[in-house]
Amino acid sequence: MLTLALALLLAPSDYGVARLKQVMPGSVRLVTAIGAECPQAVPGGPEALSIARTAKQLTLCGSDSTGLMYAALDTAERISWAAGKGDPLQFVHDTAEKPDIAERAISMYTMQRALFEQRLHDPRHWERYFDMLAASRINSFVVIFGYENGGFMAPLYPFFFDTPGFAGVRLTGITPAEQKRNTEAFRAMIRIAHARGIRVTAGIWDHIYRGGVQGGGIAGASENAGKAVPGLVTGIDADNLASYTKAALRSFLDVFPDIDAIQFRMHDESGLKPSEMETFWHEVFALIKQKRPGLQLDLRAKGLPDSVIADALSQGLRARVNTKYWMEQTGLPYHPTHVNTQNQHDRRHGYADMLQYPQRYQMTWQLWTAGTTRLLLWGDPEYVRRFSASAHLYGSSSIEINEMLATWMLGSPHDEKPGEIHTPGYRFYDYPFERYWLFYRLWGRVSYNPQCPPDSWEREFVRRFNANSAPHLINGVRLASQVLPRIVAAAYRYQNFPTTRGWAEMMRQDALPKFADLQGSDIEQFLNPRDEARRMLSGGQTAMRRPAESAAWFARTSGAILKEVAAAEKAMGRTAGKEFATTVTDLRILAGLASYYAARLPAAVSYNLYLETGNVTAFDAAIAGEKSAIEAWRGIVSAAAEVYSEDLAFGVHRVGFPRHWKEELGKLERELAELVSARAKAQTSAAARALPAAAAYSVNTPPAVQILPPSQATVGQDYRVSVRAADPAGIQALRLRYRHVTQYEDYVAVPMAAEADGLYTARIPAAFITQKWDLMFFIEAIGRNGSGRIYPDLEIETPWVLVPVKR
């Protein structure tokens, strides 16, 4: 008889113990030993754990109840793998773990009332959802009220209660009984989360509804501001805005005393006018200081003035700044080398100018996965590892990731019943979130421990499919998960950056002439098609990734995904079920998107060559490329045809959100006809320029560069950067590019001087080094064959080097 002992100074998690009891065979007995010795030391800090096994005893230990719960859940899962296979603990191993990222949050939006209330009032939903998050080691959950709702939840308070002294402030159409039901349901949700070690944050994003951008593009929404329309709050105006908010917030903290944190949207999109902000926030901060001085506050960075941050800190509040990681989309797993110039000098799309010293606050990084991965499966462990490492910038240790299906029903009428994601024959789950188990598993487990053993998700593939197909599905999903981030980084029109305007999974990104003017979203790493055409014509050189390189990447990745799909199908044979069918459908769609951009990026370069030269040969090449892209899109439509609903509502239809890929196909075909018609009217004139030689289209192997380990920088001293570089064709140029760690700055470029044995050096002058900022740099390398590359290489690591300044 094996003994399973739980050793902790505190009582163990009831939830974790209950899960253990569910899976324990009769050959294992459970003994709880409060205060017992742990045979393997538990790492320091919250949520740490250790698991130690001897011949006759397995001991689970935790630094707190959450750490012990994680140990119990992991053990329970590993026991379940061994069901009927001899030793019930054969997959349980000695381990000691502690969190790498301290706060690992998932956030949801309340964008559509019917869908939100359907979830809110279903305790079984929350139990299943938080079971999944706890097993994934997600420890924080953010409910965002009042974003792109057409005024719903602007503000949230009357959805739950009326505020004493403000009888005129009402949510039109709600009854006291409904308010009570909503309140009890939200309290129950908090209790269910807390029982699983998950903290709950209320995201209060709207304070008054004034239409405009708050309308979210929903027809008629802005015109309803201030009107007694069902679902909207009336009775708040400029005169009582601050006083009502303070009274309502006080009541909110009384009604929900167990809430763990509040996240505030600070700027004009919350309904506040810039002239109201400082006074409004001063009074709100004062109320929190009086009522809940230890409450965690997340202040959204967009439009956030230094004066408001200073006010919160001067009042002694636990305030930190929450900012977007890569605009409102999922880019590559590093802080962008250079954000788009349109928003380079505001606090909208990244850390901006907020990483100053002396440090006064912590940052928390919000990855808006909802702007990109709304529907299709995602699971790339290496992405999470790299993202988590980058989340430690500025000493931070907090991330927030949008849940899957986060924008489902965005833009739909609030009384419209939520539809289905899949057609009836392909639905295999009780709740749609259950199909995304890998997304949550990776974001939680890998950010908790970047060295997390992969069996924690690989064996789940075996359980759901079979041992022969699992490796192919794992690799297929991993490869497919790289497609959308690459589209966002290298092939995205800037107009699509908002969550409410862009959707890389389903949008074609307009007709080719508009697409050809794209900029991408790391403008230092990826050359856009317009500038590539000009470079080709001028004979210039670049270290940036050219569209031809990105196209080749998309083509290789598409082929690799489809190869894994074919192998998985062969391995599954006749045992393939609904989950397998929907999984390979998603992989085919993502492979099709990769093929689409593999053809469309070169077509965009050709179209720009036509615009620059007037040479219709380039126009012909653009049309040929567009035809190939459309053929790839037809493959997407075919893959999705029987599997996905034809009414996939994830954004406002009238502002360009399609409901199905076939809707975009129709537009692509009409636009191609217009393009062909324009070509028929175009002729090469005598003034047309010749197209570049074939060599301008080719991509050669770039120089190899090794950056020598950086050291700290010292104020008052030059900082020396050294690299070793080699290229059989010879090196034409090496440049050091550097700036302070503020996205407001552009990079300074200086040539690197050659020294002995392939060593190159350059210096950042002492006058540039200040206590206020850390430094960052990268290297541009160009070979004599015209090839170029930026180092560090973004394919394997963050493509810039952080240099701390001694303080």
Image: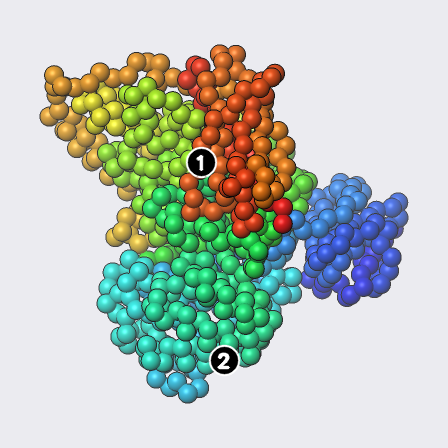
| Left or right of 480, for residue 510 | left
The answer to whether the residue labelled 1 contacts the one labelled 2, judged by CB atoms less than 8 Å apart, is: no
Three-letter amino acid code at disc 1? Val
Give the amino acid at mark 2: Ser
Residue visible at 82% across and 59% down? 7
Position of 100 relative to 543 (above/below): below
For residue 36, which numbered disc appears in the image?
A: none
Q: Nearer the viewer, residue 10 or 592?
A: 10
Of mark 1 and mark 2, the one earlier in the sequence is: 2
Q: Which residue is mark 1?
A: 748
Relative height, residue 694 to residue 289 (above, below): above
Look at 13% across and 19% down and name the residue there.
687
Q: Position of residue 588 (x, y in %)?
A: 43, 34
Tag 2 secondary structure: helix
Question: In the image, what residue occupies the spot 51% across and 41% down?
Answer: 767
Asked if 81 appears above or below 680 in the picture, the reply is below
Quadrant of res 398? bottom right
> Which residue occupies the foreground of this view, 175 or 150?
150
Judging by the rendered image, the residue that carries numbered circle 2 is 251
